[in-house]
């Protein structure tokens, strides 16, 4: 065996090493030492992020192309790890004050889901991608039900795992159809033999996409989202809404543009309908919500619709806008969920009415919440405005005028329901507002990072330019050039039978070798 293959998996191996270090610390540390578990976990994760950033290499592949890495994949992994670190910081008080939950398991499970998402981003084969999805989904179900003595959390965990199992089963069925129609599960090989007129391949593509639509909470695969977010711990809901969605959205772009690019005429109308339904229905339902976590759940469904705008463009500019949008959304949504978790712990009430008069007693918290909501709504000069602008610009450049118009109209609707919470905090009177309180140091650090990101990410053009440079190089890299040749080869292949698909795949391997 060539062990150099494992060196290419440096990002995943460093994360596995981090999990093992935390496990050893949890097993052998004294009772007083375990009190430092949260800061130790945060410091080690920060070191892992720095290792990934400074020791990232060029594009490479391992195990015959099943695993691939690139500067784009590394950048997305760093963003997901930063989101996970912020979730850990927000979780300090919740983990330490609840003596009925296991502290170490929370970090192991969260990092295990992150490892699965790493594999999703770097997969070059559908089976490895499916393993990544399952590695991410199963520990997430445990995290959703982590408050095991609360019936709502147990119910949310059951709903999540049942829906996840159903979606995974359909996706696996789609993968089997793709294998039957193409004779291969390698991404680059499959792109060479896909034929838009082949009904078996089209059916496989649609069934496979179901799993990603579920993870992104796109309508009509969204029915689980509000109940799960409401029942799960607020910090777990935050993780679901940003880190999990980032992995699914980037994977959706890479697979459908790089692998199913020849079938764009089949999947773009489906994405068009998903965008319109997700943005519109989620906005209408968000207006009626009284619980802050259900409100943020429908907000995340709507935001997922905007994200898919970047996918439907199928361009480097769309990929840049998508990743930038996800980065800004991560900062704003984590701030909103973090404050929601803090307020819920202090008051024991997750209703929006509990925020009435919050500014009078907790002005700093109220201002940060307002900034986060304004960024989610796309109000300038916050970063959310620029993220929406760039993703709209990418869609307009490809001629999606009506779709962008619908998205703009829905942005106005979203502005209304985001302002409902701002009005509650700053205008609505409350004779018995939540008393003044001080957040823990870790949460204040996380809120500071989110605040800086919300304010500066849109003003510091270097962030978008850096994302654009990496996205352009990855989109126009040799993989894209090979993809063009594969499409040309595909036009000469009948691709109506499995034997033709097998022969086309083998010919491609011979050319590459």
Image (tube, rainbow, N blue to C red):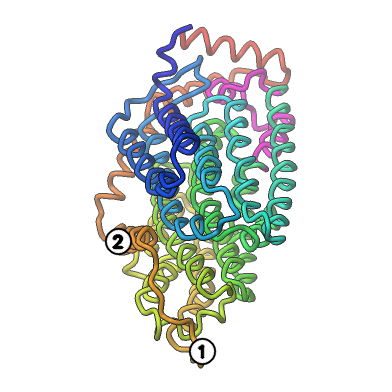
Dot 1 crowding, Cα within 10 Å, few <14, some 14–19, many 20+: few
Q: Which span of residues is magenta-colored?
A: 181-210
* 512 horizontally vs 476: left or right: right
Asked which quadrant contains residue 293, the reply is bottom right
71 up-or-down from 316: above or below: above
Tell me the residue that label 1 is attached to. 432
Q: Nearer the viewer, residue 504 or 436?
A: 436
Q: Nearer the viewer, residue 393 or 57?
A: 57
Q: Please tell me how many numbered marks the rendered image carries.
A: 2
The x, y position of residue 470, in whole percent, is 33, 38
Magenta stretch: includes residue 327: no
Sequence-wise, which precedes: disc 2 or disc 1? Answer: 1
Tell me the residue that label 2 is attached to. 452
Q: Residue at x 33, y 25 (%)?
A: 58
Q: Secondary structure at mark 2?
A: helix
490 up-or-down from 214: above or below: above
Asked which quadrant contains residue 427, the reply is bottom left
Residue 314 is at least partly visible in this image: yes
* Magenta stretch, overall SS: helix
* 114 horizontally vs 496: left or right: left
Front label number (2 vs 1): 1
Dot 2 crowding, Cα within 10 Å, few <14, some 14–19, many 20+: few
The x, y position of residue 91, in whole percent, is 47, 56
Magenta stretch: includes residue 197: yes
Q: Nearer the viewer, residue 356 or 463?
A: 356
The x, y position of residue 28, in whole percent, is 46, 34
Q: Residue 155: which numbered mark, if any? A: none
Per the model, the C-alpha gap separating discs 2 and 1 is: 32 Å
468 up-or-down from 427: above or below: above
Residue 386 is at least partly visible in this image: no
The x, y position of residue 443, in whole percent, is 39, 61
Asked which quadrant contains residue 461, the reply is bottom left
């Amino acid at each position: 065996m060539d062990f150099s293959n494992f060196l290419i998996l440096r990002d995943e191996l460093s994360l596995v090493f981090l999990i093992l270090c935390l496990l050893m610390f949890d097993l052998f540390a004294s009772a007083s030492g375990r009190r430092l578990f949260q800061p130790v976990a945060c410091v080690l994760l920060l070191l892992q992020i720095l290792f990934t950033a400074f020791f990232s290499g060029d594009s490479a592949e391992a195990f015959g192309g099943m695993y691939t890495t690139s500067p784009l994949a590394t950048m997305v992994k760093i963003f997901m790890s930063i989101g996970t670190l912020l979730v850990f910081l927000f979780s300090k008080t919740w983990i330490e004050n609840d003596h009925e939950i296991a502290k170490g398991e929370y970090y192991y499970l969260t990092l295990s889901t992150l490892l699965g998402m790493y594999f999703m981003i770097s997969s070059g084969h559908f089976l490895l991608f499916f393993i990544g999805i399952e590695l991410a989904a199963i520990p997430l179900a445990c995290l959703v039900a982590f408050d095991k003595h609360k019936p709502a959390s147990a119910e949310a965990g059951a709903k999540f795992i049942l829906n996840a199992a159903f979606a995974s089963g359909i996706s696996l069925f789609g993968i089997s159809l793709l294998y039957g129609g193409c004779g291969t599960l390698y991404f680059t090989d499959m792109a060479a033999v896909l034929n838009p007129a082949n009904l078996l391949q089209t059916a496989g593509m649609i069934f496979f996409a179901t799993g990603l639509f579920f993870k992104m909470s796109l309508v009509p695969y969204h029915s689980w989202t509000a109940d799960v977010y409401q029942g799960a711990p607020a910090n777990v809901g935050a993780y679901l809404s940003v880190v999990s969605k980032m992995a699914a959205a980037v994977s959706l772009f890479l697979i459908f543009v790089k692998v199913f690019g020849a079938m764009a005429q089949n999947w773009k109308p489906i994405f068009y309908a998903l965008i319109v339904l997700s943005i519109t229905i989620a906005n209408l339902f968000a207006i009626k919500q009284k619980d802050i976590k259900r409100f943020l759940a429908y907000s995340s469904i709507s935001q997922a619709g905007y994200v898919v705008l970047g996918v439907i463009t199928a361009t480097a500019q769309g990929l840049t806008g998508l990743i930038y949008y996800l980065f800004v959304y991560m900062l704003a949504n984590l701030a909103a969920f973090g404050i929601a978790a803090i307020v819920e712990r202090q008051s024991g009430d997750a209703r929006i009415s509990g925020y009435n008069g919050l500014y009078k007693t907790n002005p700093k918290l109220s201002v940060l919440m307002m900034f986060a909501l304004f960024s989610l709504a796309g109000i300038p000069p916050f970063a959310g405005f620029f993220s929406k602008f760039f993703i709209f610009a990418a869609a307009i450049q490809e001629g999606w005028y009506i779709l962008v118009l619908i998205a703009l109209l829905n942005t106005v609707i979203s502005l209304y329901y985001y302002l409902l919470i701002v009005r509650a905090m700053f205008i609505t009177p409350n004779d018995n507002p939540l008393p003044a309180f001080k957040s823990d140091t870790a949460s204040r650090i996380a809120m500071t990072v989110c605040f800086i990101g919300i304010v500066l990410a849109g003003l510091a053009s270097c962030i978008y330019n850096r994302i654009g440079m990496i996205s352009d190089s990855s989109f126009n890299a040799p993989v894209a050039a090979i993809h063009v040749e594969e499409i040309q080869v595909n036009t000469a292949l009948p691709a109506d039978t499995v034997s033709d698909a097998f022969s086309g795949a083998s010919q491609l391997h011979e050319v590459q070798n």
